[in-house]
Every structure is written in C-alpha cells, then in structure tokens.
Image: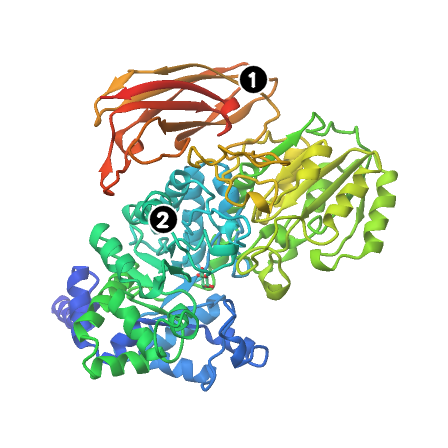
Amino acid sequence: MIMMIVAATAATVFAKKYDMLYKNPDAPIADRVEDLLGRMTLDEKVGQMNQYVGVEHFRANIGSIKPEDLKNNTAQAIYPGITPDTLEKWTEQGIVGSFLHVITLKEANHLQQLAMKSRLAIPIIFGIDAIHGNANCPDNTVYPTNLGLACSFDTAMAHTIARQTAAEMRAMNMHWTFNPNVEVARDPRWGRCGETFGEDPYLVSLMGAATVKGYQGNLNSRNDVLACIKHFVAGSEPMNGTNGSPADLSERTLREVFFPPFKAGVDAGAMSLMTAHNELNGIPCHTNEWLMKDVLRGEWKFPGFIVSDWMDIEHTYDLHATSTSLKDAFYQSIMAGMDMHMHGIYWNKYVCELVREGKIPESRIDESVRRILNVKFRLGLFENPFADEKTTMKVRLCPEHRATALEAAHNSIVLLKNDGILPLTAGKYKHIMVTGINADDENIMGDWSAQQKPENVVTVLEGLRAAAPDATINFVDQGWDPRNMDPAKVSAAVDAAKNADLNIVVAGEYMMRFRWTERTGGEDTDRSDIDLVGLQEELIEKVAASGKPTILILINGRPLGVQWAADHLPAVIEAWEPGMTGGTALADIIYGKVNPSAKLAITIPRSVGQTQMTYNHKPSMYFHPYVVKPSTPLYPFGFGLSYTTYKYSNLHLSSSEIASDGTIDVSVDITNTGSRDGVEIAQMYIRDCFSCVSRPVKELKGFSRVSLKSGETKTVHFSITPDKLRFLDRKMQPIVEPGEFKVMVGASSDDKDLLTASFNVK
Ligand code: BGC
C-alpha cells in the first residue's frame, strides 16, 4: 500500500515536473526547442536574440562614460535612459537572452536567478572574452595569448588549454567564449595581432580547430562551453592597419587566405560565429548577405548562430552609413543572416516593430531563436543554470591548470638571437641589472586580461630572482608606461649598467585593459610604426653602450622592428604575452632549465615599410627589391633558435609522380647534433611550380614537434594529400593541376633552412 502511494506520488511529480515538454531533459532537443518556441511571445523571442553588458559593468561605468563616448568605446558601456535595475527587471520578464562582461560568479548566479523567475524560465547564456584562459575575470588561470601559443605549433596544447578554460568558465557559470580569433594576421600595425594564431592560414586553421574542439567537447557536459570563431572576415588586413577600417580584397584572396580558418572552425563544430567590424569591398560584414547566407549557411552549412560584434550593427548607420536609421540597420542585418545582437537597448523595440509591421517575417525570427535555444539546451543550461560558489575555486587556478600555463609559456617563447651567452651559466653573472617597462609588471599577462592577484602572477623580475638566488639583482624601475618614460630613470639604468656584469632589458608594449586609453598594444591600439614606443630604444642602446653584455626580452602582441637590438645585442628573446607564469618561464629559459623550441608564427619585419612581408607571398613580390634596405624580414616565419642544433637529411618522397587524387609520404631524418636534448618544430612547405594563376612561393602544409635527445636521429613523416595541392583556377573552381610541385622541409620558411625535392602530378 505504502509502495503504491509512493509510486503514485512519484508519477504525479514526474508529470508535474515535465508538464511542458521542453522541460523534459530526456526529450530530443529538437522537440524541446519546438515546444518552447511554440510557447514564446514575439517579445520573448526577440529578447533571446539580444545581449546586454552585465548590471555590475553598467553600474561601475555610470559617471565614468558619457553617452557621447559610447560610439567609439569598444570595451565599456552604459545604457542611457535606463538603470541597472531596469536590466534586472527585463531579465525577470524573460526578454534578455544573454549577458556579456559579467565577471563574477555571484553576479552570474544572481542574473540567472532572475531569469529563472521569468514566465518560461529560459536560462541566460553568459558570454565572455576568454581568449587565453578566462582571464578577464579574477582568479582564473592566464595562459599565453594566441600568437605565442601558435609559436609552439602545438595543437594538442591548444586543445588542452581550451578544455581547461572551459572548465574554469563553467565553474563561474559562464558558457560562451568569444574565441578563437581565427583571423589571419597580415599587418603588424594592427593592434590585435596578438590574439590571432599568426599569418599562416594552415597553422591558424589547425590551431583554431583544436581550440574549438577543446572548448566545446561534445557541447553536452558541464565542462563544455560554446566557442565563437571570429571575426568574419578580413579585419586582419585593414587599410592603414587601423582596427575596423575597410578591407578591400579579391574573392581569391578571401577564399585562399581568410576563409580557410573559418571553414576549418565550422568543420570542427563551432556553433557560434562573430562578424567583423569592417566593411568588405564596400559592404559592412554585419549586413553582408553573401558572407552570412551564401558562404556560411549555403556553402559551409554552418548550423550555429551568428552574433554581431560590439555596436557594429549600429555602425552600419552611424559610421558606414549604409543604413538610414538604427531600425533599418537591424532590419538589414537580420535579413542578411544575423541571429544575435551584441548589445543594446533598442533592439527589442525596433525588431518587434519590424515584425509587427510585416517587414521581417516571424519565421525569420524563429530561425534565429531556434539556433540559440538549441545551444542552450545542448549546454544543459535548463537543467544546470547555476554554478556552485563553494566548489568554484577547486577548478579555477588549480595546480594542473597552472602547470599547463607554464608549459605553454615555455613552448611559446621564441629565442631570436643568441651568440652563445644563453643559457646563462649559473654563478657566472653575480651582479645583474634588470630594467625596462615590462620587467616587473603584470602586463606579461597581455591583452584580454584583467588584473589578477599579485601572488598569482610571476613577473620577469620575480622569475629571475627565484632562479638566481645567489646573484645580486639590481632592479631599475622604468614604470609601466612606455609613452611617459622618465629620462632620469633611463639615466639611472645607464649608470647601474656600468656596475653590472650583465644587463637585462625587458621592453615591448603595454596591453593591460584596465588602463584602456594608455595602452600601446591589443585591441584598438593600432600604430603607424612598429618601433619600440617612448624612450625604450634609447634605454636599450645606452645600457648596451656600458660595454657589459645586454640581453633584450620583448613582451608584446605584435611584431616589433627591433633591428638595432638584432644587430648589436648578444641575445634577443620574443616572449609575446606569456601569461601569468611568464616570469618563471622566461627565467627557466634564460638559465637553461628549459631549452627553447618555439618558432615564429608571424614574420617579424624590419620596419613598418615591410608591413606585408608574409612568407607566403607571390613570386613577383621582390623581383625588384628595395634599394638601400634589404628585402628580407628581420626574422622569417617559422624561425626560432634552440640551445642545441639540428641537422636535416635524407629528404625522401615515396613517389615522384602521383595522380591528382593521390597521396605522397614525405620523410626526413632530423638529428640533434648539439649537446642538449630539445624539441624541433619541423616544417613542410609546398610550391606549385607552374599554374594557371600565380601561386605563393611556398605554403606551409605540414609541421611536427619532434623531441630529440642529444645525438639522437628520428625520421619524421609528412603526407601530401590532394587538399594540400588544391587551389582556385581562373574560374574560381577548385583544382589540382598537373605538373611539377616542389616540397621543402626544414627548420624555418627561409630557403637556406630547407631541403627540397620535386614530384609531378599526372
Ligand atoms: C571585440 C570582440 C569582443 C567584443 C566583446 C569587441 O570590441 O571586437 O572581439 O568579443 O568586443 O568584448
């Protein structure tokens, strides 16, 4: 009897719990989406398509940002005319789909609580720029930024970092990262180079795809987050280098250089994509039907949702002037394929009006809402809308994640020059002078990082002090601000240099977001030159003039033209933005605990005059070389030194002739000819020797990280498959053309580092 009552009660509870199909976790997701969609009002649907900055962000900026600043500010927002309380009320009313810039778990849970009170209790999806770890939020692991990570050529590491970041995000109730940035960086003046995986479409594609897979897993567990490939497209070759300026590019260049990483991201399963600030050949990406409908949905069958970038739909009206009002901008964007709006208070009103006026069919709105709800269901947000404040710190900053951050930093730091001074012999240099804007600053974390607790960040100075406890380290502070360096402090360093056995100058750029307008690197910090800012060059040259050995360490996100240092100093290290363990990683390399292995994922030009010096240029590029200065870069793509040496030999192709759908195995022997164990990043490039349209002099089509003990030889294999030979013919059709191809294998993209062989396609 009792059993029967219990069973009956359970049945009632079950029926009651799932009185609406969409609430039943066991029902197929497509059914849940349709059931929910059928219950939603127009206002609720349009609300799902809209995002706002978090209420705390809004609150913190009231007073500090004026309404007239909003148009140009891409990092901070307020909503004139409403209060943060209004936003909370809207959330409770179920007309908010997403928030961004919520940076604490407390706030995320609070806003979610409000959403749970709404009529249909549709959970919020929280988006955040977790570009290299969930670094914009306090107390998370900060890994090296994408450009440094790409220099490791380590796709498995990219996957691991994305997985760990996803876990840290979910521990904070964040579900959606606006990363990976899969733009192909082609202009060092552009401030955002550091958040990309560099200049090569193949490398960017593989790093991006691994990152997408790492974030998303199967997009169904409590450790998975939604990835967002961005920014579609071509903002990384902006006119004059300025962020968001027009891109005017041929369809061939788009399809051969800029599209492949996005296609790879879609194929890897990315379920969201962000459009780019810029106009493309006259049409803003945010209202570009060709990009969103024809290419993304039509050709690539992208199943996820498209989100706009910060105020960029608005900018089709107030900047590009290709729409005549805000309402027209929303209309054009939605009809071109946009699904979600980042961010603002006019969307709901105007879009509902457009539907009620019959201009946008409600079925078009339903398409977008379906895509958004699908992701919310897959992420399990209906079942698990909250994260646990008690256990959150078990995941964030855990030892395993910090160890990964350190390993990634070790593998991303590029040794550009070493005349033998490195690694430093322990005990040889007893008096070391350390100086430079980045010597003792949290700026090593790079762009897209908030300030973190000092005890979680190891600066270069701290790393060196820990690695060389017996040395006397004299730190001469230059402040953090390259634009406002003090000549007296430079003089102090110059004086101190004379009394040291060794000088270490830590220079570069300033990227920390909390000083948004004072930065020289990162988003919206484009430059008309690529020199060191301020008195940094003078500091380096005068310190070196002491006659004491001087080493330069660079912390920056874009390539810098450090020609003088390359010519005159015994050692130069490019550390990029190595993350919160950067100081330890650098000290490990400087003192030889770790043998550097990274290779450049981007060319370092000599000066701004060499802006487009990518390695994969066309054959006629330097037919007429520059006069006076060289036509070669300062350091080529794929270049990086080690403390050991490697020899490549026995390049062998399994066949010298293949059919156009055939495969060739390429093998090469690599010997560690030096006295230290190391990891060599071997690279394979291909050139189509004669073709119906001009083809690059070489293109990366394979790479391998090979660990080799001193004296050891390993045979490394690459495979040449048809996709690596294919290009677009004169009619823009994909083709593998018969004829001769050259294969080049070696240590960098520089011809002198490459062994070559040829084969024919029949
Ligand atoms: C950037 C995006 C970013 C967004 C939100 C924009 O300014 O272009 O990449 O995701 O801000 O922070």
Left or right of residue 521: residue 714: left
Q: Residues within 10 Å of mark 1 (few under 14, many from 20)?
A: some
Question: Which dot marks residue 212?
Answer: 2
In x, y percent, where is residue 300? 24, 50
The amino acid type of the residue labelled 1 equals: Ser
Observer-nearest of 410 and 419? 419
- In the figure, 23 relative to 471: above or below? below
The mark nearer the N terminus, 1 or 2, is 2
Instruction: Classify mark 1: helix, strand or loop.
Output: loop
The image shows residue 287 at horizontal and vertical percentages of 31, 66
Regarding ligand 1, which quadrant of the image does it lie in? bottom left
Quarter of the image where one finds residue 453: bottom right
Residue where numbered disc 1 is placed = 710
Bin the neighbour count of mark 2 within 10 Å (Cα to Cα): few under 14, some 14-19, many 20 and up: many
Give the amino acid type for the residue marked by disc 2 in the picture.
Answer: Val
The location of residue 678, given as percent across then percent down, is 55, 25
